[in-house]
Amino acid sequence: MSDSEPIRLQVITGQANAGLQQRLSDQLEALSRVGESLTLRLLDLEERLSAVEAHLSEPEGSNSEGNLSALTLLTATDERIARLEELLEAGRSQAGLEPPHDSALSA
């Protein structure tokens, strides 16, 4: 072994170390970008979850368009049922029939 071989070995080892350090640096930077992306996605998910929770915590009887439509439909149905009951009662009284004494109908 000559005196120049340890120097050459140090240069090769130094270049290998520099290459290894560069790869580690690149991988660390990529990992950092992945962490940042995951953090942003997590924040977005938390915002969406809060919006869903707020929507679910709204009172059931709120005046939203869907609830108002359902209430209108139920009111119209109730009115139709009352008219049908009146017609049935009128038909029974004309025929001389007594109204049924069923507890389910009177409730």
Image (tube, rainbow, N blue to C red):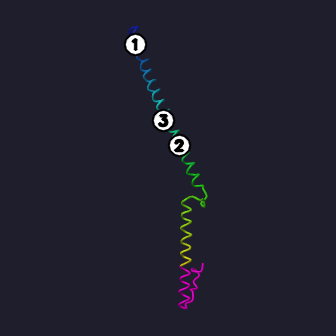
Instruction: State the residue in front, 73 or 53.
Output: 73
How far apart marks 1 and 2 lie (CA) works out to 54 Å
- Residue 22 is situated, as x and y percent measured from the top left of the image, at 45, 24
Against 34, is 80 above or below? below
The residues bearing labels 3 and 2 have C-alpha atoms spaced at a distance of 15 Å
Neighbourhood count class around disc 3 (C-alpha, 10 Å): few under 14, some 14–19, many 20 upward: few
| Front position in the image: 46 or 68 | 68
* Quadrant in which the N terminus is drawn: top left
Q: Amino acid at mark 3?
A: Val
> In the rendered picture of this protein, how many numbered marks are placed on residues?
3
Q: Nearer the viewer, mark 1 or mark 2?
A: 2
* Residue drawn at point x = 51 percent, y = 41 percent: 41
Q: Which residues are magenta?
A: 84-107
> Which of the two labelled residues, at mark 1 and mark 2, occupies the earlier sequence position?
1
Please state the horizontal and vertical placement of residue 67, each as a whole percent of the image: 56, 61
Q: Is residue 10 left or right of residue 54?
A: left
Q: Residue furthest left?
A: 1
First-in-chain label (1 vs 3):
1
Q: What amino acid does circle 1 point to?
A: Arg
Is 79 drawn above or below residue 41 in the view shown? below
Q: 60 or 71, which lies in front?
A: 71
Q: Label 1 belongs to which residue?
A: 8
Residue 9 in which image quadrant:
top left
Using the numbered discs, state the Cα–Cα distance from disc 1 to disc 3 in whole angstroms: 39 Å
Mark 2, secondary structure of its residue: helix
Upstream in sequence: badge 3 or badge 2: 3
Residue at image mark 3: 34
Instruction: Say which residue label 2 marks.
Output: 44
Q: Residue at x 49, y 37 (%)?
A: 37
